[in-house]
Image: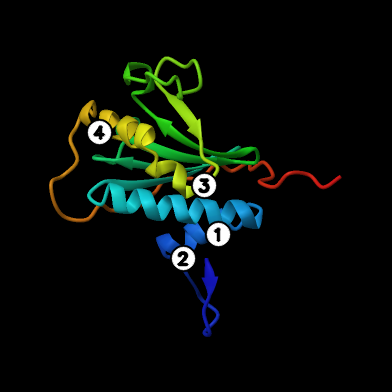
Amino acid sequence: MKASKKGTTKPLSGEQQIKGFIAKYEPKYQRLIRSVRKALRKRFPTADELIYDYNNAFVIGYSPTERGSDSVVAIAAAVNGLRLVFNQGPTLPDPKKLLLGSGKQTRFIWVESVKTLALPEIEALMRAALDRAKTPLRPSGRGKLIIKPSSAKQRPRQKPRR
């Protein structure tokens, strides 16, 4: 909430809330999160952007529905870096063995730069994830921004200084 001139509080907009979530990270990760979010918003304009502020990570999913499990891809920011997560990861063709993880549903890649998303092999993974989506993205329009409830307990988002 933000205090107004009259002393009352008005709720923060979705974008203001996102700025607050991102501000918890080191400046270099803040820039990376913003640039990757912008690129994915452009790549999936009709997807809903689902925002989660979990206790150990900040996640933005790009989904045809309001359900996170339907997300085509998501970015997950944690203290150790930024990942691009594929919900259909185990079923995706990955001839170069880029996908990491061993979960039953997801796989991920580390994102060091927004340029990672433009690599042909990463673009192919995103295209395959879109093709395998249970629900297709809308053919036109603009996706909604949906802020999901946050975790009450939060872990630090910056590496401890030594």
Going 38% across and 22% down the picture, which residue do you hit?
Answer: 89
Q: Residues within 10 Å of mark 3 (few under 14, many from 20)?
A: some
Return the mark for residue 86.
Answer: none
Residue 73 position (above or below residue 13):
above
Percent x, y of residue 43? 29, 48
For label 4, the SS is helix
Distance between the Cα atoms at labels 3 and 1? 22 Å
Distance between the Cα atoms at labels 3 and 2? 29 Å
Return the mark for residue 130.
Answer: 4
Left or right: 81 with respect to 10? right
Distance between the Cα atoms at labels 4 and 1? 30 Å
> Along the line of sight, which residue is nearer the eye, 162 or 110?
110
Residue 41 position (above or below residue 105):
below
Going 31% across and 32% down the picture, which residue do you hit?
Answer: 124
Going 43% across and 32% down the picture, which residue do you hit?
Answer: 85
Q: Which residue in the structure is indicated by mark 1?
A: 20
Q: Residues within 10 Å of mark 4 (few under 14, many from 20)?
A: many
Q: Which residue in the structure is indicated by mark 3?
A: 113
At label 4, which amino acid type do we have? Leu
For label 2, the SS is loop
Look at the numbered discs 1 and 2 and tell me whether their residues touch, using CB distance below 8 Å.
yes
Instruction: Give the residue furthest to the right.
Output: 162
In front: mark 4 or mark 1?
4
**Residue 71 appears in the rendering:** no
Distance between the Cα atoms at labels 1 and 2? 10 Å
> Along the line of sight, which residue is nearer the eye, 19 or 147?
19
Percent x, y of residue 122? 38, 34
Disc with the residue nearer the chain's start (3 vs 2): 2
In front: mark 3 or mark 2?
3
Disc with the residue nearer the chain's start (3 vs 1): 1
Return the mark for residue 12.
Answer: 2
